[in-house]
Each structure stands twice: as structure tokens, then as C-alpha cells.
Image: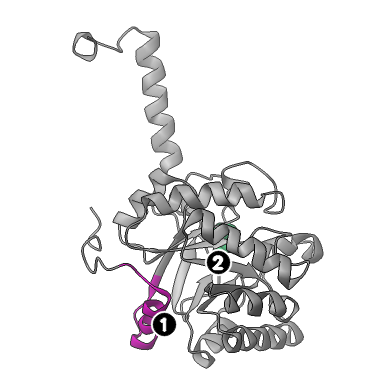
Amino acid sequence: MSKYIVDDPRKVTTHRLIEMKAKGEKIAMLTAYDYTMASIIDAAGVDAILVGDSASNVMAGNVTTLPITLDQMIYHAKSVVRAVKRAIVVVDMPFGTYQVNADEAVKNAIRIMKESHADALKLEGGEEILPSVRKILDAGIPIMGHLGLMPQSINKFGTYTVRARDEEEANKLINDAKLLQEAGCFAIVLEKIPATLAKRVSENLDIPIIGIGAGADVDGQILVCADMLGMTGGFSPRFLRRYANLNDVICDAVGNYVGDVKSKNFPNEKEQY
Ligand code: KIV
């Protein structure tokens, strides 16, 4: 049982995350895409849950996050929201739903909020998407930014390697982070960038910086739930710590079940009517 279950049962808000940064309390965030997993990780004490567009890879088996649709993200978001009592639920706006123009972005953002009842949205990008960010914020929808490695831009980057190693890209990232804070974003995810750069951004901003492959000197961490639980065997980036090996646990359980069925050991007399 997690020792964080009853620490503070109040629903986490965007304000509370900003207060946590001010107090130096680290933010623990994980992804979830379905009701069952969201119930478990909420009860175990995560502060924030991301209905990530990584559902495209983890749930649907796509190679990238690009194919997942608005309808599919809303389906996942609704399932997660139904389960969660305490954590703030943030939903990724999928590729193509906020890049065309600000009017289309706000229309899609409102649809996600209205249909899923989530608490906030996450968008990838800085200066380029600022008009969409401003318009969505003007509609009263909280936004978490996402800079560094942005999986929706994988076809532009051409690789999932560490971003912002050179000065020009690092300076752009710092500027983008400031612009997102000034616009009114309540937090920013920094993915796969040098730890020294992430530390600099965190020290210079008042809003929480949530890192994934961005080192320890940020205000919180996020991992993809299936990765940290050891369900996705072939994916082993340096930043990933596995807290369980569910792949082996599930394989053993299923192997035992198959064996019991074949040997007529399941069901037994007590397991029938
Ligand atoms: O979609 C996702 O899971 C994400 C996290 C990796 C931050 O954006």
C-alpha cells in the first residue's frame, strides 16, 4: 500500500501545483489512459495524471503519437476522469488540433474540456503556438506547456535524441518557457534535455517544471506509466527507472492460467455453481 494515499485527500489544482513549487515540494506525475490504471495510480498518491497522446503508442501500437485523434483522446480522457478523485487530470491535445489556427485550437480545446471533464490541457511547442495558447487560456482553460523533445514533431527532428544541447536551441527553449509562463501557463513539461538547462529553466520560472529525462533539479517528474511498471520491455532510455516488472508478472500469471485450463485444474468444484 502506498504511504501517500491519505497524505492530503484534497483535489489537486493548478494553484496547488504552483504552491508546491514555492514550498519546494516535488510533484509526482504519471500517464494513464484507462479507468482501472487511473484508479490505482490516483489512490497511490500521484499529484497529477497526464492522459498523454503516448496512448497512440502504448494503447494502439502506433510508431508515433501523430495518428491519435481528438475523439480517441476524449475517450481516454473520459475513462481517466471517471476514476480520479484527487490528482489533477491533464489531457494532451493531439497533433493537428491546435497548430492550424487559434480559432480551431480553442474549438478543439473546449470540446475536450466539455466532453471529458478534465482539469487542464497540454500542448507541445513555444512561440510558434502562442496565439493558440493565448486563445485557449482566454477561454478559461488551464494549459501545461511541453518543450524540449516534442514527440509530435518527430518528423521534423528525425530522432528521439536529447534536445537543446547547442546554445541556439537552449536559448530558444529558455525564451519559449518564459513566453509560456507570461502567457499564463500553469506548468511546463521539459522532455529529454540536459539537466543543467532544465535546472536553469526551473530556477528562472515561478511555474512548476515537470521533467522527463531532464534531471533532478526540476519541480516534478513524469514517466509513462506502462514504462515505469515494466510493461513495455523494448524501451529502455537512460532516464527510465522501472519500479516493477509487470511484463514478467503478467506472463507468469497468464502462463499459469493457460496451464490450469489445459490440465483441467481450473475451474475446480468451489469455482462453479
Ligand atoms: O504523451 C505523453 O506521455 C507525454 C509525456 C511523455 C510527457 O507527453
The answer, for residue 178, to whether it is visible in the render is yes
Q: How many marks?
A: 2
User: Which residue position is annotated with label 2?
Assistant: 121
Mark 2 beta carbon near ligand 1 (under 8 Å): no
- The secondary structure type at the circle numbered 2 is strand
Q: In the displayed structure, would residue 134 be above or below residue 122?
A: below
Q: Which residues are magenta?
A: 11-27
Between circles 2 and 1, the one closer to the viewer is 2
Where residue 259 appears, x then y in whole percent? 39, 15
Q: Residues within 10 Å of mark 2 (few under 14, many from 20)?
A: many
Asked if residue 17 is among those painted magenta in the image, a careful observer would answer yes
Label 2 vs label 1: CA separation?
16 Å
Where residue 126 appears, x then y in whole percent? 69, 78
| Amino acid found under the numbered disc labelled 1 | Ile
Q: In the displayed structure, would residue 250 be above or below residue 53?
A: above
Where residue 98 appears, x then y in whole percent? 70, 66
Q: In the displayed structure, would residue 223 be above or below residue 145?
A: above
Q: Which mark is residue 18?
A: 1
Q: In the displayed structure, would residue 150 be above or below residue 135?
A: above
| Residue at screen point 44% across, 79% down | 219
| Residue at screen point 71% across, 49% down | 67
| Residue at screen point 48% across, 84% down | 207
> Do callouts 2 and 1 mark residues in contact (Cβ within 8 Å)?
no
Q: Residue furthest left?
A: 270
Tell which quarter ligand 1 is in. Answer: bottom right
- The secondary structure type at the circle numbered 1 is helix
Say whether residue 201 is left or right of residue 170. Answer: left
Q: Nearer the viewer, residue 51 or 194?
A: 51
The answer, for residue 238, to whether it is visible in the render is no
| Amino acid found under the numbered disc labelled 2 | Leu
Say whether residue 243 is left or right of residue 112. Answer: left
Where residue 223 appears, x then y in whole percent? 49, 61
